[in-house]
Amino acid sequence: MKVYSTHFILKGKSDYKDLAPVFPDILKLFLEEIGQMPDEEEILQMFIELNMIDLELNRKPEGYNRKGKFRMVFPMDRKEFYIKTYNKSNDMGRIVEGIKGLLDSGGINYDVKQNDNIEFD
């Protein structure tokens, strides 16, 4: 199975807690772009709150791993998050550019790395 991903790697002193001010906007942008914005505001707020609790405590949050063509993943072993999909898509570029803009506006120090076409068994 092929996976396409874009990684946002936190650099220097940037840490999970630094994502807290911009994370609600990142999650909203992500959900809007992938067409999975919840119908009820309470559900959206629950997703945001669950992640914000961890971010504010400088811990790895859950991200957004529901069924769909895209996922937002925070790996266990490194300070980063990434967007992945199993189908190459033009939507990825819009999502990445939107997230980069939000990270920049939040003053977060990061690098972006593309992992196109990684094969998993």
Image: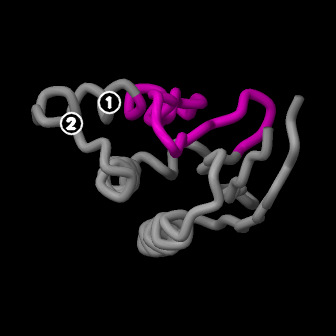
Magenta stretch: give its range.
51-79
* 14 w.r.t. 61: above or below: below
Mark 2 and mark 1 in contact? Answer it, CB < 8 Å. Answer: yes
Q: Earlier in the sequence, mark 2 or mark 1?
A: 2
Instruction: Name the dominant secondary structure of the magenta segment.
Output: loop
Q: Which residue is found at the position 45% from the left and 28% from the top? A: 66
* Viewer-proximal residue among 80 and 34: 34
* 107 w.r.t. 45: above or below: below
Image quadrant in which the N terminus is located: top right
Mark 2 or mark 1, which is nearer to you? 2
Relative placement, left or right, of 107 versus 30 is: right
Q: Position of residue 113 (x, y in %)?
A: 77, 64
Q: Which residue is found at the position 72% from the left and 56% from the top? A: 9
Colour mapping: one colour
Element at badge 2?
Answer: loop
Q: Position of residue 74 (x, y in %)?
A: 63, 36
Query: How many numbered markers are drawn?
Result: 2
Question: Hey, what amino acid is under mark 2?
Answer: Pro
Dot 2 surroundings within 10 Å: few (below 14), some, or many (20 or more)? Answer: some
- Residue that badge 1 annotates: 47
Q: Which residue is found at the position 42% from the left and 46% from the top? A: 20
Dot 1 surroundings within 10 Å: few (below 14), some, or many (20 or more)? Answer: some
- Is residue 20 shown to the viewer in this render? yes
Element at badge 1?
Answer: helix
Residue 38 is labelled as: 2
Q: Position of residue 101 (x, y in %)?
A: 45, 75
